[in-house]
Image (cartoon, rainbow, N blue to C red):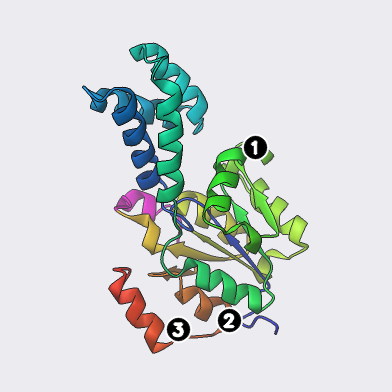
Amino acid sequence: MPARNDIDVALFDLDNTLIPFLGPLRRWAQAWADEAHPEGPDPVREALLDVTLDDAEDPKRAIRVVTDRFDLHDEAPEATERAQQVYWRALTPYPGIRGTLARLASAEVPMGVVTDAPREPAAVRLSATQLTRFFDVVVTRDDTDGGKTSPRPFHLALDVLDADPEQAMMVGDWPAFDVRWPSRLGMVSVLAAWGTGALPEHARCKAQPTHEAENPRELRSIALDEMPTAAERRETVQAGLC
């Protein structure tokens, strides 16, 4: 069944659009610190988070740095294994994401991910949440210089999908990255309000999206002119997304 509303391709940001980002990362750091240094886990946890976020989301390097800093070489292997299990369990898509992706797929809308996450962490998050199968292309920070600070990642995704910008939709939580260039390229831009959190006003004013969606199911009406059912709306309210 062809898509309506002139949307032939849908692109998505990953973190805070498909999957919450900081929550699982904090649980991972807490689990590692609790196991490796139970008598004083807070400084270890904070150091692990700081190094991970400052160093291109490289948890392996962060663990090496923190292990050396706090002399936790004996404790590190067991802590790493436990923390990884906690992280995988914490990864889950936002309510409504999986069903919306399945609906777009059933409407034969090709889909891709355009993310500033590095290739390996992006693959882990998509695999752990069983979202990989929905996407025909995943463009990461490692695929272009500068990531979403330029239009190159969007051009790459559209080229792979053989799509024109005017028939494409980009969904993301950060206006400066997920709205600005897609809008300039002529794409339909959708601000994922369910993932923006306490977005600073100056960040919100960086670019004006074509649409602002309060929950993922609204993407069906934007892309397919299809409204969610009453049951789905009730489920959304119960999930606290609107």
Magenta residues? 198-208
- Disc 3, SS: loop
Q: In the image, which is nearer the foreground, mark 2 or mark 3? A: 3
- Disc 1, SS: helix
Query: Which amino acid, by three-letter code, is at mark 1?
Result: Asp
Say which label, 1 or 3, has the lower sequence index. 1
Residue 158 can be seen, yes or no = yes
Query: Which amino acid, by three-letter code, is at mark 3?
Result: Pro
Say which label, 2 or 1, has the lower sequence index. 1
Q: Residues within 10 Å of mark 3 (few under 14, many from 20)?
A: some
Residue to which mark 2 is pinned: 224
Calculate the distance from the C-alpha at mark 1 to the C-alpha at mark 3.
Answer: 36 Å
Magenta residue check for 205: yes
- Disc 2, SS: helix
Does residue 224 appear to the left or right of 40 in the view shown?
Answer: right
The numbered dot on residue 228 is 3
Image quadrant of residue 1? bottom right
Query: Which amino acid, by three-letter code, is at mark 2?
Result: Leu
Magenta residue check for 177: no
The numbered dot on residue 142 is 1
